[in-house]
Amino acid sequence: MREKPASEQETSGVHVWLVLWKAFCAMRSVAEASIRETGLGDSEFRILEVLLHKGPLPVNTIGLKVQLTPGSISVAIDRLENRKFVRRRSDSEDRRVRQVILTAKGKKSIARGFRTHADIMEAAAGGLSAAERTKLLGLLKKLGKDAAKFKN
């Protein structure tokens, strides 16, 4: 089926949502399969990835960054601690705050897993040139910021 000229393409908000949703589902499917190959669950992968790139963080900060509730983040960190991928320590400035730190085992696992995941996601986005990606990212950010105004 040929693509319609720009002047004939559907541009309604509903159609924008439908196309965005279909693209998201396709990319999510690739990402989920890639993450499964690491032997980690989705939340565990996200936690280790943020620690790999941001360094030690308080539990509540990790939860916000990876969009997990306080209960879910605690359970996920417990699982990672049992696997010896992370450890908790008291913050040197505020002992009420618990920092989560990657262990050597955790760093080795997520560094290898993330590298493979990044390669797979790069291939999945390979249909877009660098210029197209830059434009898409700018448009998605603009769309997200504007849509955020409608939160209840």
Image (cartoon, rainbow, N blue to C red):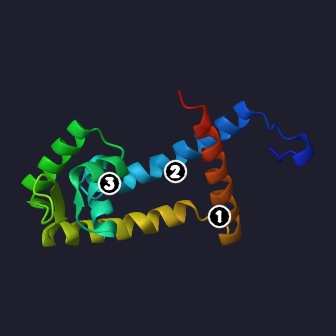
Residue 99 placement (x, y as % from top left): 17, 59
Q: Which residue is mark 1?
A: 133
Of the residues under marks 1 and 2, which one precedes in the sequence?
2
Question: What is the quadrant of the N terminus in the image?
Answer: top right
- Circle 1 residues within 10 Å: few <14, some 14–19, many ≥20: some
Q: Residue at x 55, y 45 (%)?
A: 24
Name which residue type carries label 2.
Answer: Met
Looking at this view, is 123 or 47 the one in front?
Answer: 47
Q: Give the Cα separation between the discs numbered 3 and 1.
A: 23 Å
Residue 97: in sight, yes or no?
Answer: yes
Residue 33 placement (x, y as % from top left): 38, 51
Q: Give the Cα separation between the discs numbered 1 and 2.
A: 14 Å
| Picture quadrant where residue 149 is located | top right
Name which residue type carries label 3.
Answer: Arg
Residue 5: in sight, yes or no?
Answer: no
SS for dot 3: helix
Name which residue type carries label 1.
Answer: Arg
- Circle 3 residues within 10 Å: few <14, some 14–19, many ≥20: many
Q: Which residue is mark 3?
A: 46
SS for dot 2: helix
In contact (CB < 8 Å): disc 2 and disc 3: no
Q: Residue furthest right?
A: 7
Answer left or right for 146 relative to 124. Answer: right
SS for dot 1: helix
User: Mark 1, mark 2: which one is toward the viewer?
Assistant: 1
Image height of 97 relative to 105, above or below: above
- Circle 2 residues within 10 Å: few <14, some 14–19, many ≥20: some
Of the residues under marks 2 and 3, which one precedes in the sequence?
2
Residue 48 placement (x, y as % from top left): 26, 60
Q: Which residue is mark 2?
A: 27
Q: Give the Cα separation between the discs numbered 2 and 3.
A: 16 Å
